[in-house]
Image (cartoon, helix red, strand yellow):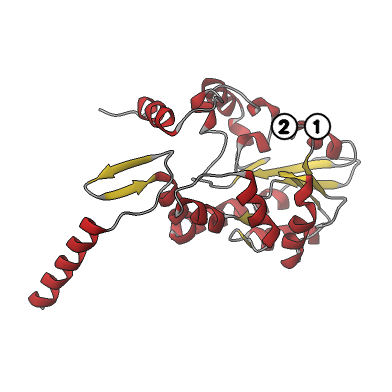
Amino acid sequence: MRKTYLLGLLFLSACTTTTQVATSPASTTQSGNIVVDGKLFATLFQQRAAEYRALCFQAFNIARLRLDNYNAPGTKPRAIVTDIDETILDNSPYEAHQVLQGKDYDPVSWKQWTDKASADTLPGAASFLKYAASKGVTIFYITNRNESERATTLKNLQKFGLPNADDMHLMPRKDTSSKELRRKAVLATHDIVMLMGDNLADFSNLFDKKSADDRMRNTNFSTADFGNRFIVLPNPVYGDWEPVLYNYKKYTAAQKDSVLKIMLKTY
C-alpha cells in the first residue's frame, strides 16, 4: 500500500514539473509550473460540477412554479422571452476548445462552432419550455447570435423538439446588441409573463452598457423581479460583468490582469 502511495506521489511530482496546461492569456496565474486559468475552471464547473446542474434545475423549477401561479389579467396571448446561449443551449465545448488552445472568444471560431448545431441543452431547459408550451405559452428566442447563424441555430433548437423553434419566433441581433427593441416587438402582440437569461441585459435596458456601480444599483432596484419575472441561469465563463470592469475598453491581456487584481477584495 505504501509503495503504491509513493509511486503515486512520484507520478504527480513528475506531472507538475513537466506539464503545463494550455490556457487563455487573458486571465492566468501561475503556481510553480502549473498554470491555473479562470476560464478553464469555469468551464469545468459548467461541465462537471453537480452544483451547476442543480442551479439549472433550481432555475427551471422556479420558472415552472411562477408560470403555474401567473394569473395577471391580460387580453393578449402569453409569451416567455428567452435568451439562447447559456440559457437554453450549452456552449461549454466551444469554451473548452478555445481555452485548451490558449485562446479567448473570436467571431470566426464561434461561427465554426454554431455551424455544427451540436450544442446540448442546459439541464431542465427543454422540459420547461415544452411544459410552458403545453400551457399555451408562446416562446420567443431573443439572441445576440448574428442573422447569419439563423439556420444553424434553428437546426440546433429543433434537434431537441423545442417549441416555436422557427423563423417567426427566433430574433437574432441585427443593428444593436441591446434586446430592448426586440422585447418591445414581442410586447406589441403578447403579454410577456417571464424572461430568462444568463446576462442581466437579457431582462431590461436598465443593464445595457451600464457601469459596474449602475449594474449593482439596478440589480438592487429590481430585487423583486429575480425569481419572479426574471429567471437567471448561471454562467461563470463570460458575460457583461467582465467587460464592464474594463469600462468596455479594449485592453491587452496584461492590462486586463492588472484591472482584475485591483477589483478583487482581500484582507
Q: Residue furthest bottom?
A: 1
Type of amino acid under label 1: Leu
Residue located at (53% from left, 33% from top): 241
In the drawing, what numbered circle is on residue 178? Answer: 2
For the N terminus, the image quarter is bottom left
Q: CA distance from mark 1 to mark 2?
A: 7 Å
Residue located at (56% from left, 26% from top): 248
Type of amino acid under label 2: Ser
For the C terminus, the image quarter is top left
Q: Secondary structure at mark 2?
A: loop
Q: Is residue 164 left or right of residue 237?
A: right
Q: Secondary structure at mark 1?
A: helix
Residue 72 in the image: state x and y as whole percent. 79, 40
Query: Of residues 132 and 53, which is closer to you in this image?
Result: 53
Residue located at (46% from left, 30% from top): 252
User: Quick check: 176 above or below 72?
Assistant: above
Marks 1 and 2: CB-CB under 8 Å?
A: yes
Callout 1 environment at 10 Å: few (<14), some (14 to 19), or many (20+)? few
Q: Which residue is mark 1?
A: 181
User: Quick check: 104 above or below 9?
Assistant: above
Does residue 85 show up? Answer: no
